[in-house]
Image: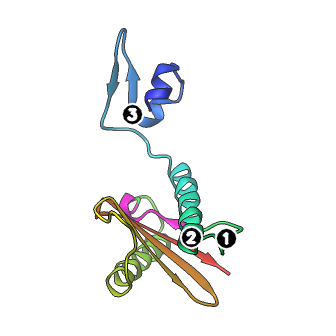
Amino acid sequence: MIRHIKKDSKIINKYGVTKGDAQYFFGKDFEVDVELICDCLDKIAKGIYYFHNKGSKKIIGFFQVSPIFLGINPDCSDEMRQRIEKITVYTYQDMREYPMHGENQDIFSYQVIENEEIIVLNMLFYKEKVVSTMFSK
């Protein structure tokens, strides 16, 4: 963010930053770019999967990303709401039943659940921000 401010970037408003005469203001309200967040989380999941498998396995394609920490958009369809709720329930159940990995789990932890059909990679940021990703083989 600092880099964008120093360059007087035109995208700072995407992050809730506005420019005054001689200073910048960080507001509380800004529109979340869900697509950008999902793209970033997909790349993180691919890197974690590669790291977890000590470089022996690599994902070619895209994870289906569910940033559970963002909640459910009140404008989404009932079908989408039910799908997100189902993913949320399964993710929390997996996080209770399977081991979490990570050296500093107060900051970040993850789990990989894999079978012949699917790879599930759940991530937990700061012990509260949950993301579920799935890759169909």
Task: Give the residue drawn at x 32%, y 66%.
Answer: 105
* Residue placed most toward the observer, 1 or 49: 49
| Kind of element beneath mark 3 | loop
Q: CA distance from mark 3 to mark 1?
A: 35 Å
Mark 3 or 1, nearer chain start: 3
Task: Give the residue drawn at x 64%, y 90%.
Answer: 116
In magenta stretch: residue 111: no
In magenta stretch: residue 65: yes
Q: Position of residue 99 (x, y in %)?
A: 37, 82
How crowded pointer 3 is (Cα within 10 Å; few <14, some 14-19, many 20+) is rated as some
- Dividing the picture into quadrants, the one containing residue 135 is bottom right
Residue assigned mark 3: 16
* Residue placed most toward the observer, 57 or 3: 57
How crowded pointer 2 is (Cα within 10 Å; few <14, some 14-19, many 20+) is rated as many
* Residue placed most toward the observer, 61 or 101: 101
Where 131 falls versus 96 (above or below)? above
Q: Position of residue 108 (x, y in %)?
A: 36, 62
Label placed on residue 58: 1
**Tag 2 and tag 1, C-beta contact below 8 Å:** yes
Which span is picked out in magenta?
64-72
Q: CA distance from mark 2 to mark 3?
A: 32 Å
Label placed on residue 49: 2
| Kind of element beneath mark 1 | loop
Q: Position of residue 75 (x, y in %)?
A: 43, 58
Query: Mark 2 is on which residue type?
Result: Tyr
| Kind of element beneath mark 2 | helix
Mark 2 or 3, nearer chain start: 3
Query: Mark 3 is on which residue type?
Result: Gly
Query: Mark 1 is on which residue type?
Result: Lys
Question: Looking at the image, is mark 3 or mark 1 nearer the viewer?
Answer: 1
Mark 2 or 1, nearer chain start: 2
- Left or right, 8 with respect to 55, comes to left
